[in-house]
Amino acid sequence: MEKVKCLIIGSGPAGYTAAIYAARAGLNPVLYTGPQPGGQLMITNEVENYPGYPEGRNGPEMMDDFRKQAERFETVIRNEMIVKVDFSGPIHKAWSESGTEIHASTVIISTGASAKWLGIPGEHEYENKGVSACAVCDGFFFRKQKVAIVGGGDTAAEESTYLAKICSEVHLLVRRDEMRASKIMQERVLNTPNLFVHWNTSPEEVLGDGEGVTGVRIRNNQTGESKNLEISGFFVAIGHTPNTGIFKDWLDMDDSGYLIAKPGRSLTNVPGVFVSGDAQDKIYRQAITAAGTGCMAALDAERYLVETGL
Ligand code: NDP
């Protein structure tokens, strides 16, 4: 058994930022990276909207910078998963996949969320070569070009109108004859002149030339007819899954599994357990907002330790 003052679960911008703040505050944090060290930015080519990088930065290199900064202040980083927790007492227990039992005075959760994918041919092959799950991150690379985006929720509505400001044509593929997005968002979609909604339409295959995306084969779900759409960017906006399964017996979460923090804070329903990043954010989901909430969680953890004397 190992006792720690601050256990951080997850290694995206939220986890590493929490580590930098917690380490500099003398909390000697131990960070478990999870299955994808660096988080979602590891599958992002170029990050151009993170302040402080005027020339942009490749996602994996950026996360390497985050990790080095956390290590500089002696965060202990383990490339492992936490597979089980027990938040029933004042000391929080966690178990790693290799069997280490950790007793932590504070826990910062930054396990993030994973984009849902369609699982169609070409999708994985062209990931980062024209296929993306984040319009805000990658839309700019397709300026003045034709793109398609799949989904019918608020994310698809928001991202398609965002793309329409940058791209020459946006084709929104909605699998039913209606969208589940809020009315106001739908109106925005329908009133955007270069945004074309294809109802009852599902993508069948992302087409490419080996280097990048050149089109998508789409099927009309009513008639069964297929045709090709010429595009150079293919965006998937069919929802995310927060990586919060191991906390379901202990922490308040919404119907989709997003952890619920006290408004404006990082506090969960369990004293000493804090949440940051996409595990609690289904709206903004940006590296910069994740980093901001990671900072909040570390400051809240530090304050909690002072107040409780743990
Ligand atoms: P949602 O789960 O709300 O919507 C997912 C959409 O993707 C649905 O329209 C669904 O279709 C479609 N879909 C799912 N699987 C497939 C598939 N295999 N092929 C084609 N289409 C598919 O996810 P969102 O990310 O849009 O939103 C998540 C939550 O975040 C919601 O509560 C939303 O309101 C909120 N949000 C709020 C925002 C805001 O307030 N500004 C912005 C973004 C999100 P179907 O409808 O047929 O099931």
Image (cartoon, helix red, strand yellow):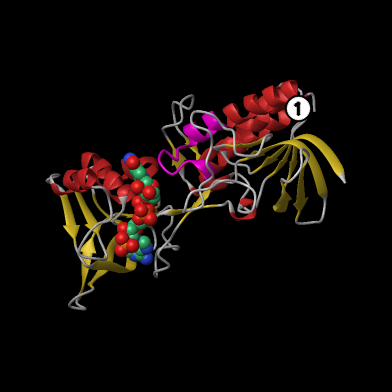
Q: Is residue 43 left or right of residue 66?
A: left
Provide the residue designation for mark 1.
27
Task: Specify whether residue 209 is in view.
Answer: no
Farthest bottom residue in view: 224
Q: Is residue 217 left or right of residue 52?
A: left
What's the magenta region? Answer: 279-293
Viewer-proximal residue, 270 or 169?
270
State the image coordinates of residue 265 (x, y, percent, origin top left).
54, 29
Position of 138 relative to 233 (above/below): above
Three-letter amino acid code at the position of disc 1: Leu
State the residue at coordinates (55%, 46%).
112
Farthest right residue in view: 1
Helix or strand or loop: what does disc 1 sit on?
loop
Quarter holding ligand 1? bottom left
Position of 260 relative to 23 (above/below): below
Is residue 290 within the magenta segment?
yes
Viewer-proximal residue, 282 or 71?
282
Residue 18: which quarter of the image? top right
Predominant SS of the magenta segment: helix
Q: Residues within 10 Å of mark 1 (few under 14, many from 20)?
A: many
